[in-house]
DNA sequence: GCGGGGGTCATCCGATCGGTCGATGCGGGG
DNA sequence: CCCCGCATCGACCGATCGGATGACCCCCGC
């Protein structure tokens, strides 16, 4: 059984999804939200497995922001974006906000069901047009760290302080800090914990 | 008589060990290696009983990889890791690579001698701090964090500072720090970067 | 020969972290 | 009923981090 929260500002769309999902025995819709704010509140309260999120929400925060807030909740549900458009900006912003999947409304119902179950299990599902764009983006966007920066990152992941990193690599603390600053820039973070987190997820480190 | 191969990228450390081991009548140092690659080659050529291996080797492969290759040799020598740090990651990787023992450089010389003879006989010797961690690992298989601690860890992996973690979870900074301290204990680290690293490797976090 | 990227180093300072006490409240198991 | 694990909070302090700046060197490509 997978529990769902719907979020779409269009009543007819919600009704349509409700009818569609009602035909699936192992999917239960816990609630509906007509705005991003409502979605965040209901996600925290109802604790569904998956949130089906539209990106265009009219008034208030948009779907990306709602996604960001929902995934920032403790033990957050997975957010499956279900929208009409597939522009690069939307896709990257949604993924960046923590969306687990990105489906187009033109998708066949069976695909939607499959994607919901995948999302509940934490697996990512992307509609074909979306997938190709993401792949293209990955190649260009993946941060390229220099060898030395990877050395620093490796020591950082061991939890060492700057002094110990410096000793391990036979350089000064000042140099370590300089490298760290650049690593933060490239990874889009501003703390060592964040850097390690991104590095592990991007598999930038051996082992 | 036990024959030894030293591997450490620091010349002074090798010299120190050489002098130290020279005072032991039934220990003979067959050779020294300044890099992992050299250690593997010399181990194959000199066939010592025991290889004393540092984990931090600067350039080239690290001590873990060198250990892995040496223990993969036909009729391999025993590898006794002798290093400065005792992080969980280092210990488990070294043991996983086939190390027979794991000593800290802060150890007393008599302990080193005893460990060398033990290693030659195939027995395992661990420094006290290392042993306690290994035991902890054996018992728990993996550290069991409370739900709340996982919440903290999740926010930590986003790179947030204590103040922001507190706000995200609606608690005070003091509470965040308390939880973090316990998380450090359980994961065997003492920094947030180390905690994130271990958490990611142990797959403690949803993702 | 000149620019630029990569690596190195230094100094300064406020903000933050990690450690260590102690303390409260609440729930369950003995 | 009492103890213990869990979660919560407060205060203190030294150590460390992050950010900003400016600088030097080496190598490579143009």
Image (cartoon, coloured by chain):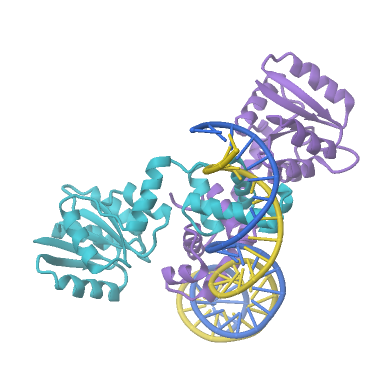
Chain colours: A purple, B cyan, C blue, D yellow
Tally of numbered discs: 0
Residue B204 image position (x, y, % from top left):
53, 42
Q: Nearer the viewer, residue B115 or B33?
A: B115
B155 lies above or below B106: above
Residue lying at the far right of the rendered structure: A59
Residue B14 image position (x, y, % from top left):
25, 72
- Quadrant position of the C terminus of chain B in the picture: top right
Left or right of A40 in this view: A9? right
Tell me which residue sits at (29%, 50%) in the image.
B68
Residue A43 found in image quarter: top right
Residue A19 image position (x, y, % from top left):
80, 16
Left or right of B13 in this view: A24? right
Q: Nearer the viewer, residue A31 or B43?
A: A31
Tell me which residue sits at (74%, 48%) in the image.
B170
A24 lies above or below B143: above
A68 lies above or below C13: above
- Quadrant position of the N terminus of chain B in the picture: bottom left
Q: Nearer the viewer, residue B184 or B5?
A: B184
Residue A32 image position (x, y, % from top left):
82, 27
B178 lies above or below A83: below
Q: Nearer the viewer, residue A194 or B45?
A: A194
Residue B128 found in image quarter: bottom left
The answer to whether residue B206 of the structure is visible from this angle is no
The answer to whether residue B103 of the structure is visible from this angle is yes
Left or right of A16 in this view: B115? left
Tell me which residue sits at (69%, 14%) in the image.
A25
């Amino acid at each position: 059984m997978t529990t769902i929260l719907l979020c779409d500002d269009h009543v007819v769309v919600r009704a349509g999804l409700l009818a569609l999902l009602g035909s699936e025995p192992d999917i239960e819709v816990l609630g509906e939200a007509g705005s991003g704010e409502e979605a965040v509140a209901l996600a925290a309260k109802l604790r569904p497995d998956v949130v089906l999120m539209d990106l265009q929400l009219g008034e208030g925060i948009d779907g990306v922001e709602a996604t960001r807030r929902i995934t920032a909740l403790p033990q957050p549900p997975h957010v499956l974006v279900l929208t009409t458009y597939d522009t690069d900006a939307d896709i990257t912003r949604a993924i960046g906000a923590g969306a687990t999947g990105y489906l187009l409304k033109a998708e066949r119902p069976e695909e939607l069901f499959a994607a919901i179950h995948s999302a509940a299990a934490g697996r990512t599902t992307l509609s074909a047009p979306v997938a190709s764009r993401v792949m293209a983006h990955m190649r260009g966007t993946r941060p390229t760290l220099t060898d030395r920066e990877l050395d620093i990152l490796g020591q950082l992941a061991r939890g060492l302080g700057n002094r110990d990193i410096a000793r391990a690599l036979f350089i000064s603390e000042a140099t370590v800090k300089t490298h760290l600053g650049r690593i933060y820039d490239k990874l889009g973070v501003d703390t060592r914990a964040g850097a390690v987190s991104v590095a592990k997820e991007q598999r930038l480190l051996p082992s």
